[in-house]
Structures are given as structure tokens and as C-alpha cells.
Image: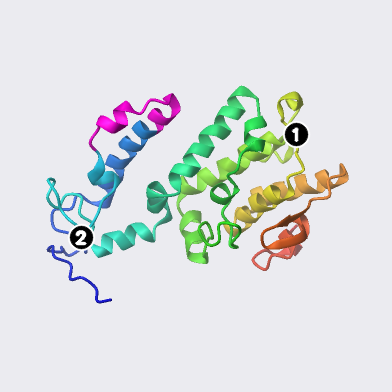
């Protein structure tokens, strides 16, 4: 199918003349996302429905009453599409932010049961292999590099691992068991080997060796305590967590 000729004048940066800029677009969007999240937390959606935000929350390639202020040129759309930090705001970032809030709440309340019973592995610990979601959360080497070199984005993935492991009674930063864990409220290892593997693999892919090695230490202790760490998934049958980590071609086994 023939491509449509873009009808708006383009400036030297490849943006539509009059475009507010991606930085301003994200500032406007973040304000509205906070309102969205508040509506979701309070289960009260009236403010969302009565507010105006379509232009910056869902920018398109046509102008409206705001003229060209929020019109995406093909180049700006490509910039957003190829930048995980920006794209996650439009798509997956909301999923991750919601899950991080749940993790933090579990940590604050010292009650980890909701964390252990929820599903979030795909977007909290994206890796370089597809699973039941196919390629939706698969990191290419370039995407992994973009995350690794963005301090704000990388911190979210590290925090996710910190809180997951805290829920299993492990302090990633000190590489040790948490003293007096709240076991009655679920602060103990559940034996969920595939989740442990994905968290570790994510840290490998993002080259976070300090956190990966801490997870490896935890896994070896878990094995000594009788956990097999074997699992089956949509694309793996009878796999073993530690072996998969150390057989990973992107990691050097002689370093552990």
C-alpha cells in the first residue's frame, strides 16, 4: 500500500512546525498519568471522564484545535517508538508503575501475599526470550542497552528486583538473608523458580552483575534448603534455574 504524503511542514529537527517537543509532551502526559493513577487507586473515575487530555495522552499525526502543538511527525513517532523510556509511558510503563506501587505497598505493610499471588513477570523482568506473550516484552540488544544507559529507567528494574527478593526474605543490596522476616505474612521463598530465573536473567541482560550475583547466591542457598529450582514454561520443559543462568552465552560463568 502506498504511503501517505505527510501534509504538515517539518522543521530542521524532523518535527512538525509548532510541535511542543517530546520533552514538553512527556511533562504534560506525566501530570495526566498521575491523575489517572489516582482515579484508579480511589476507584473514582469522574475526574478522568470530565478532564481534557486527549492531545498529549494520545498524540496523532493530524492537528486539531491545538493546531500543530501535539501533532507527531513520522520522525517524532519513530523517536518515541524506539525509545523504551518514552514508549513505556504510552504502553508498558503504566503496567510497571502499577506493579511497583503494589510492591512498595507490600513492603510498607510487611505483607507479601499479594506480591506472590500476582502476575507481572513479563513487564517487571523483561528478558531476551519470548514466552506466552510472544515478543511483546522481549528485549533486543539495542533495547537492553537503551534501558541500561538510562539511569531513571534502570532504577525501576533494579527496584523491582530488590522488592521481589525482599518478599522472599533476601536483601539484594547486602547479599544476605533478612533478619526476622515476616514469614506469617508471606515473607519467605515460595519456590517459584521461573520467577527467580526471569529476575536473574533480566539482570544479566541489563548487565547488572551485582544484583545477578546476589540472586545466584540466594538460589544456591535455596537449593541447600531443599528447593529444586526446576520449572516448566511455555517454551522450556524441565529447566533448572541456575544452569540456565550460567549457560547463558551473554554471561561469563568463570566470574561467579
For the point 25% across and 30% down, the residue is: 50
Residue 32 falls inside the magenta stretch? no
User: Mark 2: which secondary structure?
Assistant: loop
Q: Which secondary structure type mostly characterizes the magenta part of the structure?
A: helix
Per the model, the C-alpha gap separating discs 2 and 1 is 51 Å
Q: Please tell me whether residue 121 is drawn above or below residue 190 in the rendered image.
A: below
Residue 49 falls inside the magenta stretch? yes
Q: Please tell me whether residue 66 is drawn above or below residue 110 in the rendered image.
A: below
User: Mark 1: which secondary structure?
Assistant: loop
Q: Residues within 10 Å of mark 2 (few under 14, many from 20)?
A: many
Magenta stretch, residue numbers: 37-52
Residue 39 appears in the picture as rendered: yes
Q: How many marks?
A: 2
Residue 31, position as x, y percentages in the image = 31, 35
For the point 86% across and 41% down, the residue is: 225
Q: Which disc is residue 15 wearing?
A: 2
Quarter-of-image position of residue 6: bottom left
Q: Residues within 10 Å of mark 1 (few under 14, many from 20)?
A: many
For the point 26% across and 45% down, the residue is: 56
Q: Which disc is residue 188 wearing?
A: 1
Residue 115, position as x, y percentages in the image = 63, 35
Residue 61, position as x, y percentages in the image = 22, 58
Amino acid at each position: 500500500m502506498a504511503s501517505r504524503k505527510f501534509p504538515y511542514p517539518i522543521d530542521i529537527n524532523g518535527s512538525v512546525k509548532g510541535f511542543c517537543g517530546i520533552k514538553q509532551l512527556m511533562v504534560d502526559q506525566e501530570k495526566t498519568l498521575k491523575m489517572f493513577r489516582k482515579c484508579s487507586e480511589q476507584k473514582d473515575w469522574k475526574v478522568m471522564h470530565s478532564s481534557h487530555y486527549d492531545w498529549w495522552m494520545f498524540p496523532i499525526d493530524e492537528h486539531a484545535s491545538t493546531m500543530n502543538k501535539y501533532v507527531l511527525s513520522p520522525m517524532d513517532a519513530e523517536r518515541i517508538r524506539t525509545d523504551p523510556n518514552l514508549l513505556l509511558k504510552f504502553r508498558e510503563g503504566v503496567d510497571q508503575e502499577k506493579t511497583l506501587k503494589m510492591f512498595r505497598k507490600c513492603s510498607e505493610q510487611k505483607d507479601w501475599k499479594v506480591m506472590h499471588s500476582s502476575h507481572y513477570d513479563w513487564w517487571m523482568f523483561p528478558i531476551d526470550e519470548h514466552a506466552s506473550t510472544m515478543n511483546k516484552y522481549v528485549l533486543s540488544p539495542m533495547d537492553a542497552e537503551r534501558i541500561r544507559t538510562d539511569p531513571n529507567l534502570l532504577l525501576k528494574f533494579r527496584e523491582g528486583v530488590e522488592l521481589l527478593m525482599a518478599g522472599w526474605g533476601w536483601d539484594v543490596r547486602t547479599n544476605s538473608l533478612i533478619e526476622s522476616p515476616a514469614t506469617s505474612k508471606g515473607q519467605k521463598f515460595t519456590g517459584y523458580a521461573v520467577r527467580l530465573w526471569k529476575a536473574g536473567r533480566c539482570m544479566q541482560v541489563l548487565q547488572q552483575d551485582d544484583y545477578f550475583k546476589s540472586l545466584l547466591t540466594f538460589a544456591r542457598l535455596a537449593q541447600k534448603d531443599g528447593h529444586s529450582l526446576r520449572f516448566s514454561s511455555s517454551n522450556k520443559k524441565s529447566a533448572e534455574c541456575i544452569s540456565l543462568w550460567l549457560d547463558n552465552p551473554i554471561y561469563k560463568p568463570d566470574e561467579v
